[in-house]
Image (spheres, coloured by chain):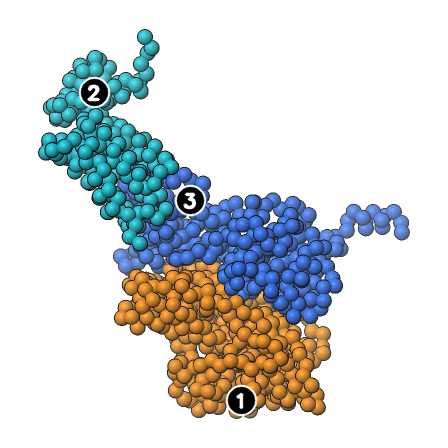
Chain colours: A orange, B cyan, C blue
């Protein structure tokens, strides 16, 4: 019997169609019902207009789209023989604002999605922590605004660098905000110092601090999530940054990765029309996002968790929480190393001179975001976007399940719905 | 007899000065010469213009406004860009024929003796009313798709340089025909050079 | 009940015993940025304490999406975010029907963001049928045209959280919100984005910024800044309490106006080097005369860098 479950609060909606057998999920398909046609809207526009339009794919990760867009355009410049020179300052500031966007995203996910979903699954009546997430996120977005003008929807990255030319006033204010954010996170979420948390060696340490994280861990273990929600235990990281490098992993074994092997295929959704496409690497499905990134960094705690619990829902959740802490520390170090006397912007050739294609890849909050642009004399001839949720939340037929389909197998419907959300799903990105 | 206003008397001085500069030259014409020609004492003259240099600047403003007013009238007419060019050329050439002292002053005094005008007339301040109207003309011409979009000075130089050149040749009595005979051809040349290239 | 008690109850009732504002927030074709902008509001907890959130796409609310599409309840304020597409469905129910039902009994409809106000970016998803609630770009058109007196347009891409906070608080405190011709609150939209920009002095003296990435220079002449022709309070009520696009060298894209998005957003449209559009309400002749004069003068102080790090080392 197939039952339909509407899932909302995932930056839009999706419908999951469950095949149940003895009250356990035996198969599922997912449909994303909305489509805006942004790739089509971009055709025929001036290339630089992509920097304003692509952030509107998504309100929570628009900044990642901005970076992917500018990287794609800069790649086209390179392929046209007019390589753009970026100063270290521009690279670092771009990375800083990207990292802060990931932080605000994860904070919102922990407090507006994860904790309420845990309450729901446990049938418990916990006090709402939603506004905590919004508050913490607002500190991060304020730091973005100091350098990028505003959040959401800044367009301060342009080919050749950034438009802003900050003084130490902005840098120090951003660091101060980061300090406030870290203190908030330590008090409300970790229950211990950031550095102590980052130094945890085993999953047992996670129960130390008496705050939200230790509660999350307790509830996950109570629900048996350390043994549920397993996918293929293989991971992909594609974005090239200072904080992460492209890599492909099967369990803990590293492999090379190249974006040319990424493709998208039609989603399988017999019960309802879907506008999503599944993203694959060399005809296989891989998981992307925080767990993939944290796995790639060989972090002791993550390695320990993975050794015990593989790529379970527990591991997925804890990796995202760990990434929060990891990036907060990293963001601070990054800011301290910015040299404000460098150029913000190195003027590139006029865009009208460019006839070439380019690819821009970014690690967005949920995983790799790929923008492919074809420019003809400065105008967009073609634009393709592949978002991270297309990797994790594809919908395929039984012969080759996508990561999310695999994780939901064998669980009750409610467990499956919880596991679905541990991927941090973004509906608007998926279908753009 | 109605009393002449200060402004009207100023105009009379200006026009007289222009004529004298044109006949005798700028440097050789003196304040007493001009005062005598308009029938006032030198002392009264200084009530209107305290120095020859100030008078020199005022003359440029006067000519610029004269041209500016006329071009504005043409700009505001509901006719095509091509017709506007025709009318501007016609107006300019008529001025050269009927009031040669004006264009002569502009070409032979203003453009050729920058030292007289110093800081007061830096850049194009003093010809602002005329330049503004030419800007309006170009702006509307491009906006309605008739003129090719390019930088302002390339277009301005072409238009005004051409007309100024023809005025100079006429002044030197090199042209075999009267300026009137050249109006049509020159208007067409200007339009063809500036028109949209789609 | 004795007289004293009646007196206390009637005259000294604390505000929080009044009925809260019932709010429903529904979406058309959107990217959700208005929600995320709203979440940045510093006074969010206190604002929400005055609101009975009947339905919201991500905040806690009394109804689920499935329940709200049953079209059985009502609200005092209906917020619509995103472009209106008459064929769009949520939970298999036409948004057209959801909008029609809830807008009938509500006192106020807030078109949240430029898409809901004028069509915005997502009009282009289906240009022949998408629009705002009462405007299709600048033409009066849309599903709520007949009840346009209820509609307040909060245009912007996205809106600033204080704009929504202002509007809701005005409604809560039962004050009339004065609107402009495009149904935008006058108090928020009568300033231009230009007012308060840190580059104003460069605008006054017509000093262009050379390319991008500089603190100095005005972006109106070459970089496409729409500040002087856009109604917005972005340089008065700063973004995220600290900044704005123009303060960080990004040109204003005019996102609160009906013609957003325009094209070639990072460069100024000129006709023979003359800006196609001059500041709002300024006659072109006047602007050109003034510009011509100011351009003649070169002010040394304004031509150099504000801070020359290289020589002050």
In front here: A168 or C81? C81
What is the crowding at mark 3: few (fewer than 14 residues within 10 Å), some, or many (at least 20)? some
Quadrant of image for the N terminus of chain A:
bottom right
Q: Nearer the viewer, residue A98 or C308?
A: A98
Q: Which residue is mark 2?
A: B16
Using the rendered image, report if marks 1 and 2 lie on a common chain: no
Which residue is denoted by mark 1 in the rendering?
Answer: A400
Identify the residue at horizontal 42%, vertical 89% (top origin): A254
Residue C115 pos. (x, y %):
54, 58
Residue B109: x and y, percent?
16, 31
Q: Is residue B65 visible?
A: yes
Q: Which residue is mark 3?
A: C279
Q: Is residue A289 left or right of residue C152?
A: left
Rounded to the nearest whole Å, what is the CA distance between mark 1 and mark 2? 98 Å
Q: Is residue A137 above or below residue A240?
A: above
Taking the image as shown, residue A370 lies to the left or right of residue A217, namely: left
Residue A269: x %, y % from top left = 58, 80
Same chain under badges 3 and 1? The reply is no
On the image, the x and y values in percent for residue B4 come to 31, 14
Query: What chain is tagged by disc 1?
Result: A
Q: Chain of mark 3?
A: C
Residue found at x 54% / y 74%:
A275
Distance from the alpha carbon under mark 3 to that under mark 2: 42 Å
Tell me the element at label 3: loop
């Amino acid at each position: 019997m197939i039952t339909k479950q509407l899932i909302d609060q995932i930056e839009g909606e999706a419908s999951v169609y469950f095949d149940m057998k003895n009250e356990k999920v035996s198969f599922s398909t997912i449909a994303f019902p909305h489509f805006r046609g942004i790739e089509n809207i971009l055709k025929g526009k001036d290339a630089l207009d992509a920097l304003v339009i692509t952030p509107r794919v998504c309100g929570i990760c628009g900044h990642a789209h901005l970076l992917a867009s500018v990287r794609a355009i800069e790649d086209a410049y390179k392929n046209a023989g007019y390589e753009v020179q970026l100063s270290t300052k521009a690279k670092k500031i771009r990375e800083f604002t990207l990292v802060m966007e990931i932080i605000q995203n994860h904070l919102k996910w922990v407090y507006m999605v994860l904790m309420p979903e845990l309450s729901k699954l446990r049938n418990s009546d916990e006090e709402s922590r939603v506004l905590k997430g919004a508050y913490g996120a607002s500190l991060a977005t304020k730091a973005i605004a100091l350098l990028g003008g505003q959040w959401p929807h800044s367009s301060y990255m342009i080919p050749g660098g950034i438009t802003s030319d900050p003084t130490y006033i902005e840098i120090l204010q951003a660091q101060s905000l980061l300090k406030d954010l870290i203190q908030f996170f330590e008090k409300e979420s970790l229950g211990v110092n950031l550095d102590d948390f980052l130094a945890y060696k085993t999953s047992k340490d996670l129960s130390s601090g008496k705050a939200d994280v230790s509660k999350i861990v307790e509830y996950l273990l109570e629900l048996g999530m350390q043994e549920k929600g397993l996918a293929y235990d293989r991971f992909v990281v594609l974005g090239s940054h200072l904080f992460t490098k492209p890599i492909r992993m099967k369990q803990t074994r590293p492999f090379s990765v190249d974006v040319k092997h990424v493709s998208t295929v039609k989603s399988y959704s017999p019960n309802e029309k879907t506008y999503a496409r599944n993203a694959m690497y060399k005809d296989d499905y891989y998981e992307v996002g925080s767990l993939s990134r944290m796995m790639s960094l060989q972090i002791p705690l993550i390695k320990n968790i993975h050794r015990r619990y593989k790529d379970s829902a527990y591991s997925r959740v804890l990796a995202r929480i760990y990434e929060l802490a990891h990036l907060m520390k990293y963001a601070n170090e990054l800011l301290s190393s910015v040299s404000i006397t460098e150029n913000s912007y190195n003027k590139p050739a006029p865009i009208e001179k460019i006839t070439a294609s380019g690819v821009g890849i970014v690690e967005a909050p949920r995983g790799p975001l790929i923008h492919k642009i074809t420019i003809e004399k400065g105008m967009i001839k073609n634009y393709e976007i592949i978002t991270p949720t297309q990797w994790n939340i594809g919908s395929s037929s039984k012969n080759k399940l996508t990561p999310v389909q695999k994780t939901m197998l064998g669980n009750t419907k409610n467990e499956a719905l919880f596991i679905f959300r541990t991927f941090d799903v973004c509906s608007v990105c998926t279908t753009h | 007899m109605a009393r002449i206003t200060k402004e009207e008397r100023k105009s009379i001085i200006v026009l007289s000065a222009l004529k004298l500069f044109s006949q005798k030259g700028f440097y050789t014409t003196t304040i007493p010469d001009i005062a005598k020609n308009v029938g006032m004492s030198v002392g009264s003259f200084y009530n209107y213009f305290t120095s020859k240099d100030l008078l020199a600047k005022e003359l440029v403003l006067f000519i610029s406004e004269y041209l500016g007013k006329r071009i504005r009238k043409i700009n505001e007419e509901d006719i095509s860009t091509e017709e506007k060019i025709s009318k501007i050329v016609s107006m300019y050439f008529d001025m050269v024929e009927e009031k040669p002292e004006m264009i002569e002053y502009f070409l032979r005094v203003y453009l050729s003796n920058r030292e007289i005008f110093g800081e007061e007339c830096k850049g194009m301040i003093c010809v602002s009313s005329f330049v503004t109207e030419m800007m309006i003309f170009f702006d509307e011409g491009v906006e309605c798709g008739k003129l090719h979009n390019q930088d302002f000075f390339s277009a301005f130089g072409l238009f005004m340089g051409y007309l100024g050149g023809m005025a100079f040749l006429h002044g030197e009595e090199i042209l075999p025909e009267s300026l009137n005979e050249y109006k049509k051809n020159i208007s067409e040349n200007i339009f063809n050079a500036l028109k949209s290239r789609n | 009940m004795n007289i004293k008690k009646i007196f206390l109850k009637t005259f000294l009732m604390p505000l929080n015993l009044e009925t809260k504002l019932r709010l429903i927030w529904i979406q058309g074709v959107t990217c959700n940025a208005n929600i995320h902008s709203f979440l940045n509001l510093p006074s969010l907890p206190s604002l929400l304490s005055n609101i009975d959130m009947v339905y919201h796409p991500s905040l806690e609310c009394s109804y689920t999406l499935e329940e709200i599409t049953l079209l059985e309840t009502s609200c005092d304020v209906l917020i619509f975010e995103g472009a209106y597409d008459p064929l769009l469905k949520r939970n298999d129910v036409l948004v057209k029907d959801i909008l029609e039902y809830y807008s009938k009994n509500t006192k106020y409809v807030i078109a949240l963001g430029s898409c809901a106000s004028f069509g915005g970016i997502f009009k282009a998803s289906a240009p022949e049928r998408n629009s705002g609630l009462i405007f299709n770009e600048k033409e009066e058109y849309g599903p709520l045209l007949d009840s346009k007196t209820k509609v307040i347009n909060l245009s912007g891409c996205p809106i600033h959280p204080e704009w929504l906070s202002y509007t809701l608080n005005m409604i809560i405190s039962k004050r009339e919100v004065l609107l402009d011709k495009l149904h935008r609150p006058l108090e928020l939209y009568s300033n231009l984005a230009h007012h308060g920009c840190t580059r104003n002095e460069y605008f006054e003296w017509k000093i262009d910024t050379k390319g991008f990435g500089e603190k100095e220079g005005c972006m109106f002449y070459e970089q496409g800044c729409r500040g002087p022709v856009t109604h917005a309070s972005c340089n008065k009520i700063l973004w995220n309490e600290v900044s704005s696009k123009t303060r960080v060298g990004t040109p204003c894209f005019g996102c609160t106006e009906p013609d957003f998005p325009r094209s070639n957003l990072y460069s100024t449209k000129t006709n023979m080097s003359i800006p196609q559009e001059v500041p709002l309400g300024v006659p072109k002749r006047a602007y050109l005369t003034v510009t011509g004069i100011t351009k003649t003068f070169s002010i040394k102080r304004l031509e150099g860098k504000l801070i020359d790090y290289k020589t002050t080392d």
